[in-house]
Amino acid sequence: MKRNKYRPLPGLFGTVFLGFLLLSGCKRDPYTYAILDTHYGRIKIMLYDSAPKHRDNFIKLAQSGFYDSLLFHRVVEKFVIQTGDPESRNAEPNQILGTGDTPYRLIPEIGAPHLYGAVGAAQKSNPQKLSSGCQFYIVLGEKVTPDQLDMMEKQKKIRYNAFQRKLYQEIGGIPFLDNDYTVFGEVVKGMDIVEKISKVPTDLRQRPLEDILVTRVRIKN
């Protein structure tokens, strides 16, 4: 699969850069998208070329129908919504979810920050920071102050550029996940749907009381 030479920069800058390319006369959109149809509406995700292992794995699973009819099994308002557990397909109402996975894990491709709308790979705590082969989450979070960003930089030994700091302050996100989890995409359309899903009632395990399905996932090049 031919890839555009421009590597998407972290977070919403990918969308900004894409707009620049289109306005400057580049007719072909160089990015790959995932279209998630849900009970609440459609979510469009741009997949990052800067995380090729996660991108290609997601494309492979989506094209095989792996994600079709899975539940959003974990929902936390102002934090994340999460799906991709294969055991959630046809799950019983009180069934505990979140442990299902593929037989393999993915080598981390850490770099992009957890800005509002970021799509990240879930993981079980492990020193190698290996990602789940299938579970992923969409970030909500809250606006972040400069002092909080300074603290994250000190604690995690990372450095945000001026644009990332600006976005964290203006649109928010979850910086304490940075440098530990792989972000491999971002929502470019449908964050209103993500917001609606994030507000549904849940049980004590953060599973929605009402089943919310990813009815279908399609890949668009």
Image (cartoon, grey):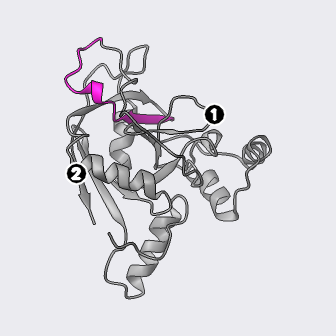
* Mark 1–mark 2 CB contact (< 8 Å): no
Q: Is residue 60 visible?
A: yes
Residue type indicated by callout 1: Pro
Please give the label number shown on residue 100. Answer: none
Q: Which image quadrant: the C terminus?
A: bottom left
What's the residue at 49%, 41% (across, down)? 140
Instruction: Using a 10 Å C-alpha cutoff, classify the residue at mark 2 as few (fewer than 14 neighbours), some (14 to 19) or many (20 or more).
Output: some
Between the residue at mark 1 and the residue at mark 2, the CA separation in whole angstroms equals 31 Å
Secondary structure of the residue carrying numbered label 2? helix
Residue type indicated by callout 2: Gln
Q: Horizontally, is 189 left or right of 51 in the view?
A: left
What's the residue at 54%, 65% (across, down)? 9
Name the residue tied to disc 1: 127
Q: Position of residue 30 (x, y in %)?
A: 36, 73
Q: Position of residue 68 (x, y in %)?
A: 21, 39
Q: Is residue 36 above or below residue 24?
A: above
Q: Is residue 44 above or below residue 213?
A: below
Instruction: Using a 10 Å C-alpha cutoff, classify the residue at mark 1 as few (fewer than 14 neighbours), some (14 to 19) or many (20 or more).
Output: few
User: Which residue extends farthest right?
Assistant: 154
Q: Nearer the viewer, residue 220 or 143?
A: 220
Q: Is residue 67 above or below residue 212?
A: below
Q: Quadrant of residue 125?
A: top right
Residue 80 on the magenta segment: yes
What's the residue at 19%, 23% (across, down)? 90
Q: Nearer the viewer, residue 220 or 53?
A: 53
What's the residue at 59%, 31% (across, down)? 126
Residue 162 on the magenta segment: no
Please give the label number shown on residue 63. Answer: 2
Q: Which residues are magenta?
A: 79-94
